[in-house]
Image (cartoon, grey):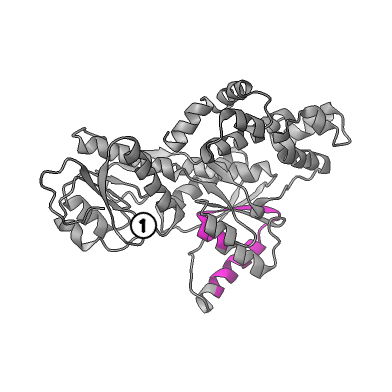
Amino acid sequence: MTRPDAPQVGRKRKVVALLVETSNEYARGLLRGIIGYVREHRPWSTYLAEQARGDEPPAWLDRWRGDGIIARIENERIAAVVTGTGLPVVDVSAANLVPGVPWVETADEAIAAAALDHLYERGFRQLAFVGDERFNWSVWRRDRFVARAAERGLAVAVAHASVTARAGAEWTAEVVRLGDWLGGLPKPVGVMACYDLMGRQVLEACRHAGLAVPDDVAVIGVDDDELICELSDPPLSSVAPDAHRTGYEAAALLDRMMNGERVEAAGLFVPPLGVAARASSDALAIDDPEVSNAVRYIREHACDGIDVTDVVARVPLSRRVLESRFKKLVGRSPHEEIDRVQMNRAQELLRGTDLSLVKVAEKVGFPHAEYLSVVFKKRVGMTPREYRKRHRGR
């Protein structure tokens, strides 16, 4: 780790400052992505500032003799100091405070779509969003969530809140206010929280108001911060952003800039990995017991290699009637639902493990890896190998 103000005479390695906090899972994912790029391409000497999100810029930055900066530009003070260095800079914050600087961020439209699809697939037609309007990313997620719901003929109730960590009257007042608002919504309702900390506060508000989760209120957050999600009661479902790829792409942009290439000062938006489903949304708001049972059976056994005949055997309906009612309520046929569950699981294994394609095929219920490859490319648009490389940088 290079000292920030150390002389760099005669060096060959590029020296890069990373103004990225380590206090949350998303930021740590960014750093892992940057590390992945550096290991794969060329070595950098890096300096990681010890700071929290939105802190004052480090005092050493205005005299720093480096080659480039990757920063979470969260306020005007950091923006002024970072741009004042005259060095190539890539921003990895949604604040977008410096229009002339390239920035890499999560695709909020895709995040909102993933949350909406998750709730819709579970039968929720009453929807709500809880956000914090101080932040761009929250506003963007709210607007996209509302727009995507409108495309399906659904309305969204919206509330604004602020996450407070303080105990006592302030915390209680916010939780009570949210609980009263949630209590007045039609039930059952599916709620998207703008990020995991807000999702955890929504769960606390449900508990205070005596609302059952997930039967009365299903909740999904964003960031898939495992500690926050698992400490929530019940554990919080969350949309998982691809922070690793975001950091990787930011490092690739900075590398090009430090090598003299002109890079357009525009946003690059990285889609999420998918939804990490946990108990806070583990419900089916489908007012049809046979279809509900069929959906539950598929989600529990799709990766065991079942087909539609197995599903029909579990419900007192003919295949024709089941398929008609299933498609009307779920929006897909039973066969398409089996495919969807298998492909989602295959993507999780390709992203999160080093299992061979043969083992992945076995775990998702395909008899041969070759058959999985054909179906995967048809459904996802790329081969399993291409998918793994894109999402894991290898």
Q: Position of residue 236 (x, y in %)?
A: 60, 55
Residue at x-position 23% and y-position 37%? 257
Taking the view exactly as shown, the residue that stands out farthest to the left is 9
Instruction: Left or right? Give the position of 114 relative to 61.
Output: right
Q: Position of residue 248 (x, y in %)?
A: 37, 40
Identify the image quadrant of residue 347: top right
User: Is 180 part of what is drawn in magenta?
Assistant: yes
Q: Position of residue 209 (x, y in %)?
A: 66, 68
SS class, disc 1: loop
The answer to whether 299 is drawn above or below residue 3 in the figure is: above
Residue at x-position 57% and y-position 39%? 348
Q: Residues within 10 Å of mark 1 (few under 14, many from 20)?
A: many
Taking the view exactly as shown, the residue that stands out farthest to the bottom is 168
The answer to whether 387 is drawn above or below residue 223 in the figure is: above
Region in magenta = 172-200
Residue at x-position 57% and y-position 69%? 175
Q: In which quadrant is the C terminus drawn?
A: top left
Number of callouts: 1
The answer to whether 10 is drawn above or below residue 347 in the figure is: below
Q: Position of residue 244 (x, y in %)?
A: 42, 43
Q: Which residue is mark 1?
A: 21
* Between 394 and 66, the one nearer to me in the picture: 394
Identify the image quadrant of residue 90: top left
Residue at x-position 78% and y-position 45%? 287
Q: Is residue 233 visible?
A: yes
Instruction: Left or right? Give the position of 90 relative to 280.
Output: left
Identify the image quadrant of residue 296: top right
User: Is 102 part of what is drawn in magenta?
Assistant: no
Instruction: Left or right? Give the position of 51 relative to 142.
Output: left
Q: Is residue 266 visible?
A: no
**What amino acid is labelled 1 in the image?**
Glu
